[in-house]
Image (cartoon, grey):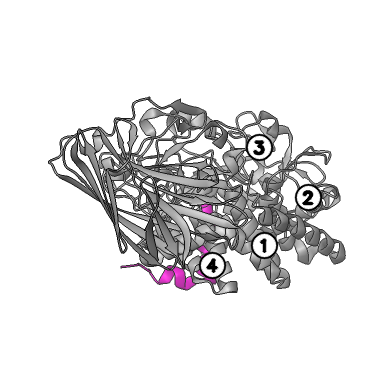
């Protein structure tokens, strides 16, 4: 690496004798840019001075170093007198062709896809606080032939929380990281809330009241060069190298033993089981959510509740190993006459299966959402962008529920209990999708939303991938394997093309945007197909999906004010996952992602997927309510774990007092997904849970 002085306060960074990017030296005074009065390059060091009223006011000292293609700039500002300075680090790289902006977890392809109030590039340029990204203040540009990416180290005090802005300038992509951070032209604070920012660009909050000279030191990281692979591959490599050299992605030990995790989560999930008529049962969507509880007065076999997967969890558990305390909040009406713990769990699992059989409105047409108060079934009844979903059929919901029915049938049969309806329903639903699989422009797709008579209402997104995984589970029960082979081959072609195109959109049902679950759905599907036929080409697509998912995994700990619920608990965000460009909160979805990352590691030997799996599972043991901290609730909610962890100035319901540092919402999917992943990992990858791995 070498440095050369450019014009207008610019220093060019050469790697392997090629100019990859430049660092632009400037400050901001009273909201206006200021160029240095002097700039000097000496080896891998740069110094710059900025006058104010004719005398030196600020100096910058940069020390450059390079490791594995990542350039670290350790910058020290020395501020000699108090005035309205803001500090910034700006770098740019030339492309010579059209390039796209990518801000992980915040903006992809300009956020042109979908509906919602979330920021779109066309309304920018934008500035976002560092905590909205899985690497602090991370932004990147990419084209068919080049990439450029930057981030900084995480803030450890409120006044050092930075922000990042990025924009195209001629044929260059420019990234600026600023302290103190501020968001403009607006701040995204809720699903329907985009609040204009104040015009004041003052920087005094950083240094006001400090002694002088005042010194600030911060590390910045940049990488640029020829593109090899997608932007997600480049981001994954960037994160992997930072984990090796800069302390990102640190794996902390679980805060609970895995037996404690299992027992606490079981306790709460069992408390959410509700009896239904004729011996049926279901899992309530949520409990004790205050004024918002009406939003959660539903049940479902899939998605936000996952009752059918809960039935599998109950059946696969060794009830006699579970302590009696796990069962203390079970509805007495469910326990009626069932004295043995394993007997009770098996009966509960069967009752859930029988209840959701009622969602079939016509042969092979199944709706799994149910409103117990209005006694109506629907394709989807929760918060969404379209009320008409109630009357439709959804591929994700059908895929999740029917796959669970197949396994439920098998588990019961292995215990000497054969329930033909539990396999006949999946076969009828499979027939519906095989008959209506797309054959024209979206050939091979299983669509997204369908009318009950088999007409595609919306075929965008990755929901159909769940049908592929369901069909692979159902395969032993197919009489016509050739027809199934043909269908799965066409589906693999369609969804492989989505991965190649980077079309990770529209998987979650309560938003319409680019989202993490589009990647998790494709990752699981490609692995299911690979484990079916050992077609090595499928692993390439599985990697692409996994690398997309990595762009949603937090690699550091966000700073929280110590007076917030998360701050006072010392909550660590490393290993948590963000949801979508529409939903800026963290969640515990990483338990399920980890299982598929471990499968991918097993098949490829690529250790970073293993490391990320360990990072996620250990992090997901946080914030499980227990005796010494019930997370603000009563003993009857022992084992609850919140869905929404607000790490930014955003709240799902737009509540100003519940943003950064707050958590909320008890919802069933968190407990089902966590326990289900725990069971799968403990069976297939027991060393991951037994090692207690921690990076020191």
Residue 598 is labelled as: 4
In the displayed structure, 516 sits above or below 295; it is below
Residue pictured at 51% horizontal, 32% vertical: 191
- Please name whichever residue, 324 or 56, is drawn nearer the observer in this view of the structure: 56
First-in-chain label (1 vs 4): 1
Query: CA separation, marks 1 and 3?
Result: 26 Å
- Please name whichever residue, 597 or 173, is drawn nearer the observer in this view of the structure: 173
In the rendered view, does 527 fall on the left or right side of 329? right
What is the quadrant of the C terminus in the image?
bottom left
- Residue 176: horizontal and vertical position, in percent? 41, 44
Residue that badge 2 annotates: 429
Secondary structure under the numbered disc 4 in the rendered image: helix
Query: CA separation, marks 1 and 2?
Result: 21 Å
| Crowd band around label 4 with a 10 angstrom C-alpha radius: few (<14), some (14–19), many (20+) | many
First-in-chain label (2 vs 4): 2
Please give the range of residues in magenta: 672-696
First-in-chain label (1 vs 3): 3
| Crowd band around label 1 with a 10 angstrom C-alpha radius: few (<14), some (14–19), many (20+) | many
In the rendered view, does 413 fall on the left or right side of 678? right
Viewer can see residue 519: yes
- Residue 239: horizontal and vertical position, in percent? 45, 60
Secondary structure under the numbered disc 3 in the rendered image: loop
Magenta span dominant secondary structure:
helix
Secondary structure under the numbered disc 2 in the rendered image: helix
Residue that badge 3 annotates: 380
Secondary structure under the numbered disc 1 in the rendered image: helix
Residue 526 is labelled as: 1
Query: CA separation, marks 1 and 4?
Result: 14 Å
Query: CA separation, marks 4 and 3?
Result: 31 Å
**Which marked residue is nearer to the observer: mark 4 or mark 3?**
4
In the displayed structure, 68 sits above or below 589; it is below
């Amino acid at each position: 690496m070498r440095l050369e002085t450019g014009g207008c306060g610019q220093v060019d960074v050469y790697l392997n004798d090629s100019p990859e990017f430049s660092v632009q030296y400037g400050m901001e005074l009273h909201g206006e840019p200021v160029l240095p009065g002097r700039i000097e390059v000496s080896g891998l060091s740069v110094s710059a001075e900025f006058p104010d009223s004719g005398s030196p006011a600020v100096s910058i000292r940069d020390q450059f170093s390079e490791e594995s293609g990542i350039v670290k700039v350790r910058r020290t500002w020395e501020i000699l007198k108090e005035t309205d300075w803001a500090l910034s680090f700006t770098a740019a790289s030339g492309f010579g062709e059209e390039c796209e902006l990518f801000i992980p977890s915040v903006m992809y392809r300009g956020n042109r896809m979908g509906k919602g109030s979330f920021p779109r590039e066309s309304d920018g340029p934008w500035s976002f606080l560092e905590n909205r990204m899985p690497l602090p203040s991370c932004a990147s540009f990419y084209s068919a032939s080049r990439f450029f990416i930057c981030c900084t180290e995480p803030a450890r005090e409120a006044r050092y929380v930075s922000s990042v802005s990025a924009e195209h300038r001629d044929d260059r992509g420019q990234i600026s990281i600023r302290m103190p951070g501020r968001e403009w032209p607006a701040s995204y604070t809720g699903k329907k809330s985009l609040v204009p920012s104040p015009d004041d660009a003052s920087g005094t909050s950083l240094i006001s009241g400090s002694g002088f000279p005042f010194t600030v030191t911060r590390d910045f990281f940049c990488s640029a060069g020829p593109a090899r692979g997608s932007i997600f591959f480049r981001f994954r490599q960037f994160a992997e190298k930072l984990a090796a050299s800069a302390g990102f992605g640190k794996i902390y030990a679980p805060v609970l033993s895995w037996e404690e995790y299992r027992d606490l989560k079981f306790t709460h999930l069992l408390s959410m089981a509700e009896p239904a008529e004729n011996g049926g049962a279901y899992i309530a969507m949520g409990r004790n959510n205050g004024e918002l509880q009406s939003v959660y007065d539903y049940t479902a076999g899939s998605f936000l509740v996952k009752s059918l997967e809960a039935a599998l969890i109950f059946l696969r558990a060794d009830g006699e190993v579970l302590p009696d305390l796990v069962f203390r909040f079970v509805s007495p009406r469910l326990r009626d006459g069932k004295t043995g713990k394993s007997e009770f769990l098996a009966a509960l699992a069967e009752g859930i299966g029988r209840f959701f059989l009622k969602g079939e409105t016509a042969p092979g047409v199944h709706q799994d959402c149910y409103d117990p108060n209005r006694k109506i079934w629907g394709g989807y009844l929760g918060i969404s962008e379209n009320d008409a979903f109630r009357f439709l059929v959804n591929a994700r919901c059908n895929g999740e529920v029917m796959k669970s029915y197949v396994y439920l049938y098998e588990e019961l049969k292995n215990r000497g209990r054969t329930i033909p309806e539990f396999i006949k329903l999946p076969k009828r639903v499979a027939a519906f999708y095989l008959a209506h699989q797309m054959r024209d422009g979206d050939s091979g797709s299983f669509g997204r939303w369908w009318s009950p008579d088999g007409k595609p209402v919306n075929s965008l997104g990755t929901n159909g991938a769940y049908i592929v995984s369901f069909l692979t589970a159902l395969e032993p029960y197919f009489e016509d394997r050739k027809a199934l082979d043909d269908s799965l081959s066409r589906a693999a072609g369609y969804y492989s093309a989505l991965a190649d195109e980077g079309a990770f959109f529209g998987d979650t049902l309560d938003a319409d945007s680019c989202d993490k679950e589009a990647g998790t759905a494709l990752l699981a599907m490609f692995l299911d197909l690979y484990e079916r036929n050992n077609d090595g080409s499928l692993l390439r697509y599985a990697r692409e999906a996994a690398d997309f998912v990595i762009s949603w995994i937090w690699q550091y700990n966000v700073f929280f004010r110590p007076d917030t619920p998360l701050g006072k608990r010392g909550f660590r965000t490393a290993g948590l996952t963000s949801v979508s460009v529409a939903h800026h909160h963290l969640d515990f979805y990483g338990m399920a992602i980890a299982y598929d990352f471990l499968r991918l590691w097993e098949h490829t030997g690529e250790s970073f997927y293993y490391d990320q799996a360990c990072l996620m599972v250990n992090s997901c043991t946080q914030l499980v309510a227990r005796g010494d901290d019930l997370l603000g609730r009563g003993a009857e909610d022992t084992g609850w774990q919140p869905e929404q962890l607000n790490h930014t100035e955003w709240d799902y319901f737009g509540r100003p007092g519940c943003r950064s540092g707050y958590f909320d919402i008890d919802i069933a999917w968190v407990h089902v997904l966590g326990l289900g992943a725990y069971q799968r990992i403990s069976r297939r990858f027991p060393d991951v849970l037994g090692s207690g791995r921690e990076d020191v």
